[in-house]
Each structure stands twice: as C-alpha cells, then as structure tokens.
Image (cartoon, grey):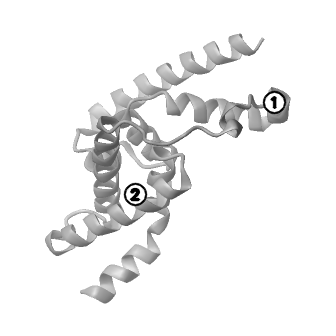
Amino acid sequence: MDKVFIEMINKHRGIIYKVCQLYCQDKEYQKDLFQEIVLQLWKSFPSFRNEAKWSTWMYRIALNTAITNFRKEKKIPPQRTISSAEFEIPDLDSNAGGHEHMGLLKQAIGQLSQIEKAVILLYLEEKSYQEIGEIMGITKTNAGVKINRIKIKLEGIIKTAENELR
C-alpha cells in the first residue's frame, strides 16, 4: 500500500503543485500546503475505491484541503512585518506583449472566490465538464453553468483592469 501511494503521488504531484500555487502566493506557505495535501491524501488513501480516476480523487482532496486551509488562515490575522520591497510598484512596461495578458488573467483569477478558482483551474487543465463535476461534487450541467459565469466574470475584471491601465 505504501509503495502504490508513493508512486501515485510522484506520478501526479503536478496536480498538488498547481493547487498550492493557486491558493498560496508565498513559497513557504506553498510547501506547508503541499505537505498538508499529501497528509490528507494519505489519510484518505485506504478509502479510495477506484470508482473514479486517481487524478479526479486527488484533485478533489487537494482542492478541499486548500479551501479548508485558506478558511483557517483567513480567521487568523497575519503576524508578519511588511518589507519595503512589498511597497514597490511594478513597472507596467515590463509586462509587454503576451506576458501582459497572462498577468491580467492571473490577477483576475486571484479576485475569484475559492470555489471559482478551483473550477477555473480544472477548466484550464482541460478537464471535461463531467470530470469537473465529479471533482467538485456538482452535476455536469452545473459545472458548465459555473464555467460560463466565471468566464463572464473574468472578462469583466480584465476589461476593467485594461481600462484602468489606459
């Protein structure tokens, strides 16, 4: 059992990394969240019944752990000092070309709710509506509706940001 678990984690660790990067900006918090997700996967592994794909099951646990972890952290006020580097305003010209659009998309996704972030991550990973529904615990139709609403919301956020840049 241990060997199978380790092989599956190594094979699909990219899923965990993506979830950690989506929910944590700080590298140290990403490492902590990664460990927490692996721990939750380990605890849940004996109950995995192969009714869904391993990656679907892994996404579901990783996203639920990240969202739960985010809620816990939100209740605890931050206890750190702000460095002078965090006050620096980025040079908007450094995002020229295609990088500008990726930066806007990342910023827009950052403004979504935790559930919306999870759904759009799965969509960007080219998961089918059926797979998204299975991972999120919703119907295929509901997944499609959520994706369309998120796209509209992202489009509005990006247009607003672009207008502010002009």
Find residue 117 and report its image quarter. top left
Q: Is residue 118 above or below residue 15?
A: above
For the residue pair 101 and 88, the one nearer the viewer reads as: 88
For the residue pair 69 and 61, the one nearer the viewer reads as: 69
Residue that numbered label 1 is attached to:
91
Q: CA distance from mark 2 to mark 1?
A: 31 Å
Identify the residue at horizontal 31%, vertical 84% (top origin). 4
Residue that numbered label 2 is attached to:
33
Residue kind at label 2, given as amino acid type? Leu
Dot 2 or dot 1: first in sequence order is: 2
Residue 143: where, in percent of width, then height? 32, 35
Screen quadrant of the C terminus: top right
Residue 92 visible somewhere in the drawing? yes
Screen quadrant of the N terminus: bottom left
Residue 102 visible somewhere in the drawing? no
Residue 110: where, in percent of width, then height? 51, 33
Residue 68: where, in percent of width, then height? 27, 46
Residue 92: where, in percent of width, then height? 80, 27
Residue kind at label 1, given as amino acid type? Asp
